[in-house]
Amino acid sequence: MQFSSFSISRLPRIIFGSGRIKEVPALAAEYGQTALLITGKHSFCSTPRWPSFTASLEAKGMSWLHVTVSGEPSPELVDQTVSQFRSEAIDVVIAIGGGSVLDAAKAIAGLLPHGNSVMDHLEGVGKNITYRGPSKPFIAVPTTAGTGSEATKNAVLSVQGPEGFKKSFRDECLIPEYAVIDPDLLVSCPRELVAADGMDAFTQLLESYVSLKANPFIDALAWSGMSAFKDGFFAAWEGTEPTASHGRAAMAYAALLSGITLAQVGLGSVHGLASPLGAYFPIPHGVVCGTLVAAATDVNIKAMLTREPGNQALAKYAQVGRLLTGHAEMDDTEARTSLTSLLTDWSEKLQLPRLSSYGITETDFPLIVANSRGSSMQTNPIALTDDEINTLLVRRL
Ligand SMILES: [Zn+2]
């Protein structure tokens, strides 16, 4: 094991387990009397859990306001919501929803005390003004198992179209006070979302495991997350009891860990490409991950075998191959080949759409490649050439 220097930044307080959403009202009451609730349009607030949740907030003496978010959040949505609620004496922001809801709420909580536009702080496209906090206290309750946003310090905001972007508002002050992960909330998640979100979580774990910034502390968490994924993903996706509820708990855990690991050591080429793909085309983030991860892994492995045969990520890919196939006896070469063919099989089994399903053509590749070199690409285990990134895209067109 290599012990080079590393740092671990703040984490939210984590509350994990079946039924634990019931603890949220008491946690929220620690911060005051007025909560802003941010949810998706349907996922939580059309279930019987919603009236019982708001009733228990009221039983703790809290009043609440409610706003819904649909689709991936834009800077405009964040700014509008901040100006709508800025004059209310909000004490705590509670988000209950998927990654988009959590990201929107994280940015809203961060700007409610200040009232300025999120464009002042958005990486790469904003005015580059340093955000100094504080944020309103923020409690994140995921209802999908994917992005791990409940554990991260960034809110991803996007504008879609030819002039589009997908960028982060990022600061340690934005880390939730509490991440409350209740696997029971995943029960209403549609099957295609379980597939795409699960592949996002897996990709995040794999990319952080082989990241250039990887360290033994985070490796242990990434490994634990990938083990949970192997244990529960297909049970959660198939949705047949009695194994499905175990699968949902495994996936809620894997997604949480993927958020922790990505926030600490970064990601790789799939997430580098997710930024331009999501900005210019209507392709959901989880689909980008699921459809590209096999080809991206193969391109990374081939590039390292050719140019950097001593790169330690090669041994790590082999370890993951042995973990996921369950064949501990495989040598490194066989384990790496098995890893890429297993990931390819998964994308077929899950029927993850190809890039062309979203109107992407080969003529779009130069623009996509040129805009793929953000922070995630910087921690890919090997610096890929434009040709290699192009090859990766061609394989999934
Ligand atoms: Zn992701």
Image (cartoon, rainbow, N blue to C red):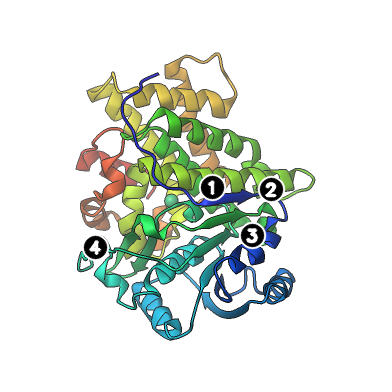
Q: Residue at x 54, y 62 (%)?
A: 139
> In 3D space, how far apart are the residues under numbered discs 1 and 3 (Cα atoms)?
17 Å
Q: Decide: marks 3, 4 in contact (CB < 8 A)? A: no
Q: Earlier in the sequence, mark 1 or mark 3?
A: 3
Q: Nearer the viewer, mark 2 or mark 1?
A: 1
Q: CA distance from mark 2 to mark 3?
A: 12 Å
User: The disc labelled 4 sits on which kind of residue?
Assistant: Thr
Figure check: 80 above or below 13 = below
Instruction: Classify mark 2: residues with Cα within 10 Å, few (<14), some (14-19) or many (20+).
Output: some
Q: Nearer the viewer, residue 325 or 111?
A: 111
Q: Secondary structure at mark 3?
A: loop
Q: Secondary structure at mark 2?
A: helix
Which of 214 and 46 lies nearest the eye of the viewer? 214
Label 4 crowd bin: few (<14), some (14–19), many (20+), radius 10 Å: few
Q: Which residue is mark 4?
A: 130
- Decide which of tag 2 and tag 1 comes sooner along the chain: 2
Question: Does label 2 or label 3 sit earlier along the sequence?
Answer: 3
Amino acid carrying label 3: it is: Cys
Q: What mark, if any, has residue 256 been given in the picture? A: 1
| Mark 3 or mark 4, earlier in chain | 4
